C-alpha cells in the first residue's frame, strides 16, 4: 500500500461524489461541533467578564445566558427558512450576494472566512485549555498541544467528509450524553435542595468585588457570551454534504444542534448560579474551566468526572472541524465567481477541497502561534465575523421574501426581519464592547479581505480582456520558428533535445556560453562535427549552427537572453523558441546533486516578458524506466523505434 493511500485513503473518482454524502447522524458532528462546543467556552467567556463583580457576578450569569438563548432561537427559525429557500447552499455569501449585491456579499464572505479561521483557533485552544484544567502539568505545552491537534484535524479532513463524520461521531455523542446527563443530575439535586445544593467538590471561592455591575460591564459580558452562537450558520452552508432529501435532513440537523445547545446553555446558566461557579484567570497555573467546576461540584472527581471532561476536551478540540467543513466550500464559491484563485475549485484525491483545507490550517497555525494558544486572547476577535454574516444573511432573506410575495412570504419576512434586527443589534454591541480588547483587528481584516477579493477579480477580468480572441485561424504565410538550443557539452540529453528542435524547424542555433574558448569549447566543436554535422550532411540535411557566446563574468542566463533579443531583432517576423534540455532525476536525494540551470533559465525567460518567445522543456529522465520520444518510422511488425 502506498504511503499516501495509508494516510489519506485511496483516490476517489469524481463519479463517487454521491457516495460521500451523509445523514443527520453524521451531519451533527461535521457541522455542529462548533455550535455544541461553544457551550463550554461561551458561558465561561461571559463569566470571565464578570470576575470584577466577585460573588455578585454569579447572579448576573443566568439572565445574560437567557438573552443569548433567546437570540439563538431567533437564529434557528431564520436559518431554517434560509435552508428551504436556498437548497443548494444558503450561506451568508450566497444570500447577501443574490439579494443585496456584490459588495454586501463579499463583506459577508470576508466576515465568514475570518470567523471560520477563528472557529478553528478558538475551538482548539479551548480544548487544550480544558485539558490543562484537568491536567495542570501540561500548562507549559499549551501551544505545542494546539498545533498537534491542528495537524490531526487537517489530516482527517483531507481524507474526506465521510471520514471526518465517522471519526468525530463517538466523542460528539459521548459529550452530549455525558454532559447533559451531568446537568440533569445537577438540576435535580439543586431543585431537591431548594436551589442551594451542597457541592461534592467545592468550587473556587469568588473574590471580593472591585467593580460595580454597570451596564457597560454587563454589555461586555453579553458580547463575550455571544460566542456561544457561532457555528449556527454552518448547516445552511453545508447542505450539499447531506444525502437526499437534502433540505429536510439539513433542517433536522439544524434543529437537533440548536435543541442540544439550548439545553446545555440553560443548564449551565442555572447551575452556575446554584453551585456558585465563577470563572478563573485562564493565564494562571491555578486555572480551572467553568465546565470542570460544574462537573466536579455535581459528581465529584471520580470516573464520571474524567469521562465527561475527556468528552468535553475532545469536542472542544474537534470543534475546529466545522471550520474545516465550511471554509473550503466558501472558498470554492468565491473562486467560481473569480474572487479567489481558481485552485480553490479543484477537488483533491478524496474529493475534498484540499487547497482550502491547507490554507485554513496555515492561517489557524499562524493565529495560534501569535496568541500563544490562549482562548481568552482570541475571544475578543471572535463573534464579530459571525454576527456580521448573520445580519447580512437575514437582511438578504428579507429582500428575498419582498420579491417573492408568496402565500407565506409575509410570515417568513417577519421572522427574518426580527432575525436581522436582533443580530444587527448584537453585532453593534459586540463591536463596541470588544473594540479596544482587540476587535479593532477584526474590523481592519474584514475590509482588507474584501479589497483582496476585488483585486483578484479585477485581475481575472483584465486577463480575460487581454486574452480575448475573435480572429479566425489562418495557416497562410506561416513560417517555422527559429529555435535556440543552449549546449554545454555533447551528451544524450543534448542529442534528444536537438532531434526535437530539428523536428520543429530547419533553423536551429545551438549556443555554447563560456568565458573562454578553452578545452570544453574545442571538445564540443569536435564532437559536434563528428556526431551532428557529418551525419546530417550525409543525409542531405542542413546541419544546425553552433555558436560560441563569450561571457567574461561567467554568467549564463544574461547571455542567453541577449541572444534571444538579438535574433528577435534580426527576424521580427519569426517566432523564437528556446528549447531547454533538462536532466530529470526520479529521486529527491539525487535531484539536488545536479545543477538546475534549466529551471532557472525557463523562469528567467518567462519573467523577462519577451513576446513572441516560446519556452520548451525537453526532459531526459534518469532511472530504470525507458521514457522517451518515439520516432515516426515504424519498425517491421508494427513496433515503433524508441529513443531516449
Image (cartoon, helix red, strand yellow):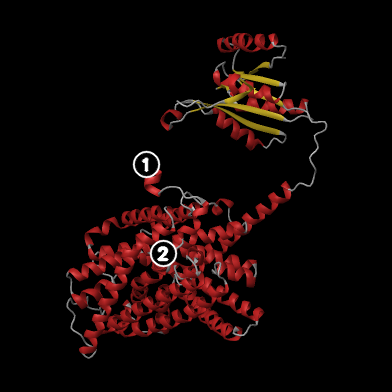
Mark 2–mark 1 Cα distance, whole angstroms, equals 28 Å
Q: Neighbour class for label 2 at 10 Å: few (<14), some, many (≥20)?
A: many
On the image, the x and y values in percent for residue 20 come to 45, 58
- In the displayed structure image, the side of residue 568 where residue 589 appears, left or right: left
- Say above or below: 102 vs 342: below
Determine whether 635 is above or below 361 in the image.
above
Task: Kindly indicate the quadrant of the structure image that contains residue 373.
Answer: bottom left
Q: Is residue 157 left or right of residue 393?
A: left
**How many labels, in total?**
2
Q: Is residue 260 above or below residue 488?
A: below
On-image quarter of the C terminus: top right
Q: In the depicted view, which residue is nearer to us: 98 or 47?
A: 98
| Side of 459 where 155 appears, left or right | left
Image coordinates of residue 234 in percent, x first then y, are 47, 68
Q: Position of residue 101 (x, y in %)?
A: 65, 69
Foreground mark, 2 or 1, reads: 1
Q: Left or right: where does residue 639 sit relative to residue 612?
A: left
Taking the view exactly as shown, the residue that stands out farthest to the front is 637
Q: Quadrant of residue 454?
A: bottom right
Is label 2 in a helix, a strand or a loop? helix
Dot placed on the residue nearer the N-terminal end, 2 or 1: 1
Instruction: Name the one closer to the observer, 281 or 529.
Output: 529
**Which residue is tagged 1?**
1
Dot 1 lies on which element?
Answer: loop
- Residue that label 2 marks: 30
Amino acid at each position: 500500500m502506498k504511503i499516501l493511500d495509508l494516510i489519506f485513503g485511496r483516490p476517489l473518482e469524481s463519479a463517487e461524489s454521491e457516495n460521500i454524502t451523509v445523514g443527520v447522524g453524521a451531519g451533527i458532528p461535521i457541522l455542529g461541533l462548533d455550535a455544541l462546543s461553544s457551550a463550554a467556552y461561551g458561558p465561561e467567556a461571559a463569566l470571565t467578564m464578570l470576575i470584577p463583580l466577585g460573588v455578585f457576578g454569579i447572579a448576573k450569569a443566568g439572565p445574560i445566558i437567557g438573552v443569548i438563548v433567546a437570540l439563538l432561537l431567533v437564529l434557528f427559525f431564520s436559518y431554517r427558512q434560509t435552508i428551504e429557500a436556498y437548497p443548494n447552499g444558503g450561506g451568508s455569501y450566497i444570500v447577501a450576494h443574490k439579494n443585496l449585491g456584490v459588495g454586501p456579499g463579499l463583506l459577508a464572505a470576508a466576515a465568514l472566512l475570518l470567523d471560520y479561521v477563528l472557529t478553528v483557533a478558538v475551538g482548539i485552544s479551548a480544548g487544550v485549555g480544558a485539558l490543562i484544567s484537568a491536567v495542570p502539568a501540561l500548562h507549559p505545552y499549551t501551544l505545542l498541544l494546539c498545533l498537534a491537534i491542528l495537524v490531526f484535524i487537517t489530516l482527517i479532513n483531507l481524507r474526506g467528509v465521510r471520514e471526518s463524520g465517522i471519526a468525530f461521531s463517538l466523542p460528539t455523542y459521548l459529550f452530549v450524553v455525558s454532559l447533559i446527563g451531568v446537568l440533569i443530575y445537577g438540576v435535580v439535586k439543586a431543585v431537591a435542595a431548594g436551589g442551594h445544593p451542597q457541592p461534592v467538590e467545592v468550587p473556587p471561592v469568588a473574590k471580593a468585588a472591585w467593580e460595580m455591575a454597570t451596564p457597560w460591564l454587563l454589555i461586555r459580558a453579553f458580547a463575550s457570551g455571544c460566542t456561544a452562537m457561532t457555528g449556527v450558520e454552518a448547516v445552511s452552508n453545508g447542505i450539499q454534504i447531506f444525502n437526499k432529501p437534502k433540505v429536510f435532513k439539513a433542517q433536522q440537523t439544524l434543529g437537533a444542534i440548536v435543541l442540544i445547545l439550548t439545553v446545555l446553555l440553560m443548564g449551565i446558566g442555572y447551575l452556575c448560579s446554584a453551585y456558585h461557579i465563577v470563572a478563573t484567570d485562564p493565564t494562571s497555573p491555578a486555572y480551572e474551566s467553568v465546565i470542570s467546576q460544574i462537573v466536579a461540584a455535581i459528581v465529584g472527581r471520580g470516573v464520571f468526572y474524567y469521562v465527561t471532561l475527556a468528552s468535553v476536551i475532545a469536542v472542544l478540540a474537534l470543534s475546529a472541524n466545522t471550520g474545516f467543513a465550511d471554509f473550503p466550500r466558501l472558498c470554492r464559491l468565491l473562486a467560481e465567481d473569480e474572487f479567489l484563485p481558481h485552485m480553490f475549485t479543484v477537488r483533491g484525491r478524496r474529493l475534498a477541497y484540499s487547497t482550502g483545507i491547507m490554507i485554513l490550517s496555515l492561517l489557524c497555525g499562524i493565529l495560534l502561534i501569535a496568541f500563544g494558544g490562549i482562548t481568552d486572547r482570541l475571544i475578543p476577535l471572535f463573534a464579530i465575523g459571525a454576527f456580521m454574516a448573520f445580519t447580512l444573511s437575514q437582511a438578504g432573506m428579507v429582500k428575498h421574501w419582498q420579491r417573492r410575495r408568496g402565500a407565506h412570504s409575509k410570515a417568513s419576512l417577519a421572522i427574518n426581519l426580527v432575525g436581522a434586527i436582533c443580530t444587527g443589534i448584537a453585532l453593534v454591541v459586540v463591536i463596541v464592547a470588544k473594540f479596544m480588547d482587540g476587535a479593532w483587528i477584526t474590523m481592519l481584516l474584514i475590509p482588507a479581505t474584501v479589497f483582496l477579493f476585488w483585486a483578484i477579480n479585477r485581475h481575472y477580468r483584465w486577463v480575460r480582456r487581454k486574452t480575448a480572441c475573435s480572429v479566425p485561424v489562418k495557416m497562410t504565410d506561416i513560417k517555422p520558428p527559429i529555435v535556440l538550443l543552449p549546449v554545454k557539452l555533447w551528451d544524450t540529453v543534448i542529442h534528444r533535445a536537438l532531434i526535437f528542435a530539428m523536428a520543429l524547424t530547419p533553423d536551429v542555433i545551438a549556443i555554447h556560453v563560456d568565458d573562454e574558448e578553452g578545452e570544453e569549447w574545442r571538445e564540443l566543436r569536435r564532437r559536434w562535427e563528428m556526431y551532428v554535422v557529418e551525419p546530417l550532411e550525409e543525409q542531405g540535411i542542413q546541419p544546425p549552427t553552433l555558436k560560441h557566446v563569450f561571457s567574461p563574468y561567467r554568467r549564463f542566463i544574461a547571455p542567453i537572453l541577449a541572444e534571444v533579443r538579438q535574433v528577435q531583432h534580426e527576424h521580427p517576423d519569426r517566432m523564437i523558441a528556446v528549447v531547454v534540455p533538462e536532466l530529470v532525476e526520479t529521486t529527491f536525494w539525487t535531484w539536488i546533486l545536479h545543477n538546475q540551470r534549466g529551471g532557472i533559465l525557463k523562469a528567467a525567460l518567462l519573467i523577462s516578458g519577451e513576446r513572441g518567445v516560446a519556452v520548451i522543456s525537453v526532459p531526459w529522465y534518469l532511472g530504470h524506466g525507458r521514457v522517451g520520444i518515439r520516432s515516426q518510422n515504424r519498425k517491421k511488425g508494427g513496433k515503433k523505434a524508441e529513443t531516449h
